[in-house]
Amino acid sequence: MPPRRKAAANPKATPKPRRSKLAKDNDISTETEREIEEAWAMCAEEDIEGFEDEKMGVIPTSKVKTVMRALGIEPKSRQDMDEFIDILDSESSGYVTYEHFVELAAIQINNKSDETKDEEVEKAFRLFTSGNERPIMYHDLKRIAGLLNQDVGDDVLKAMIVEANKGNGVGSGVDKEQFREIMSRAGVFT
């Protein structure tokens, strides 16, 4: 028998991370879970008496608002915040566990209203177009890449526009609805 051939490794292909059980249980993407984890890590404390088994540590209830703000899901009122704390810390220990926080954060993220999504699209779109009511053009992407100190080639920027506008050409730019679709595909509204 001839020897088996190994599939050629594609150095550009990186395996997509698998969703954890926690992410699956709460219907969030791997990216969203990573964002939650990063925000959590800003305030997490370890070796707190009574919570030694918590791998991700715990956060004091006084820091919940900070973590929620970092995720863009800050409660609108003090009453809402108090309700969240009551849910997260039902035993009044003064601390919140990661798993409980993910459950609440996932609900908040998954329940973002269409109005909130529209506001996010509008705000981001206006950043690209410098507040002008027109499609996002090549020069807009070039400017943003420069502001972010990203060395992105012209061909890549042009390809981004053509992909976003479904092949209508670089000169057509990307309108607000196409931009919304790109944000959705990128997981902004997970």
Image (cartoon, rainbow, N blue to C red):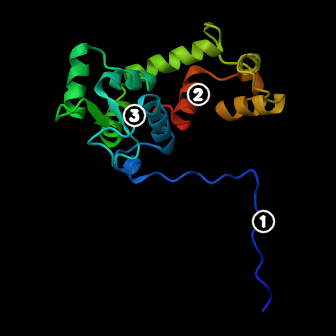
> Which residue does the numbered mark 3 point to in the structure image?
45
Q: Earlier in the sequence, mark 1 or mark 2?
A: 1
Q: Which of marks 3 and 1 is nearer the N terminus?
A: 1
> Which residue does the numbered mark 2 point to in the structure image?
178
Look at the numbered discs 3 and 2 and tell me whether their residues touch, using CB distance below 8 Å. no
Q: Residue 101, position in %: x, y?
A: 33, 36
Q: How crowded is mark 1: few (under 14 residues within 10 Å), some or many (20 or more)?
A: few
> Which residue does the numbered mark 1 point to in the structure image?
8
Of badges 1 and 2, the one in the foreground is 1
Tell me the kind of residue under disc 2.
Gln
Relative depth, front residue between 141 and 34 = 34
- Residue under the image location 39 percent in, 53 percent down: 21
Looking at the image, residue 52 sits to the left or right of residue 87; the answer is right
Looking at the image, residue 140 sits to the left or right of residue 96; the answer is right
The answer to whether residue 31 of the structure is visible from this angle is: yes
Cα separation, mark 3 vs mark 1, equals 45 Å
